[in-house]
Image: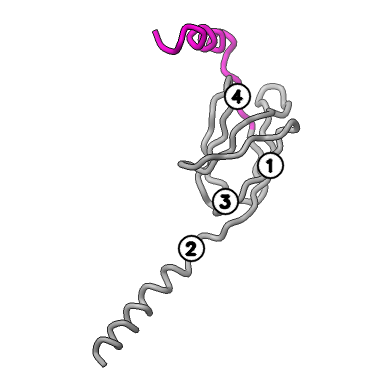
Amino acid sequence: MKQLFIALLWVGIVIPFNVQAQEIVTVTGTVTNAETGKPIYGATVALEGYNGILTNKKGEYSINIPLHSQVIFARYYYYGKTFTVNSKHFDVALKPIPKEVQEEMDRRARKGGSE
């Protein structure tokens, strides 16, 4: 009988904490160039630590994540950003990396990485 009481007590303590699991929602939005306002095709939208999805030609994305998650927005030639997503619609503007830096990135990539 004592074991049953301890088991029920344990269930009464543990279950309320597990019920508070984060709700998964579909978050949509658009990723744009911060300077031109044009959509960014192929930007990565990823839950921190997981594979993500890519934006379409209109810069739009749709991803299923827990609300209040850390989400990374990134694209080659742009400065990436990490945001805590608090709503079901979340637009992001990424700032392009300066042309000189882009050219250096390309030069190093053609040479096989670092120097």
Q: Residues within 10 Å of mark 2 (few under 14, many from 20)?
A: few
Q: Which residues are magenta?
A: 93-115
Q: Looking at the picture, how far across and down is residue 39, in whole percent?
A: 72, 29
Amino acid on which disc 4 is placed: Lys
Question: Which residue is painted at 46% across and 10% down in the image?
Answer: 112
Decide whether residue 40 is among the magenta residues: no
Q: Earlier in the sequence, mark 3 or mark 2?
A: 2
| Residue in view at x 37 percent, y 78 percent | 11
Question: Mark 3 highlights which residue?
Answer: 65
Three-letter code, disc 1: Gly
- The chosen color scheme is one colour
Tag shown at residue 21: 2
Q: Secondary structure at mark 2?
A: loop
Mark 1 or mark 4: whose residue is earlier in sequence = 1
Q: Quick one: SS at disc 3? A: strand
Which comes sooner in the sequence, label 3 or label 4?
3
Mark 3–mark 1 distance (CA, rounded to whole Å): 13 Å
Q: Are marks 4 and 2 in contact (CB under 8 Å)?
A: no
Residue, disc 1 = 29
The N terminus sits in image quarter? bottom left
Tell me the amino acid under the disc marked 3.
Ile
For marks 2 and 1, the one nearer the N-term is: 2
Q: Left or right: 39 with respect to 11? A: right
**Residue highlighted by disc 4:** 95
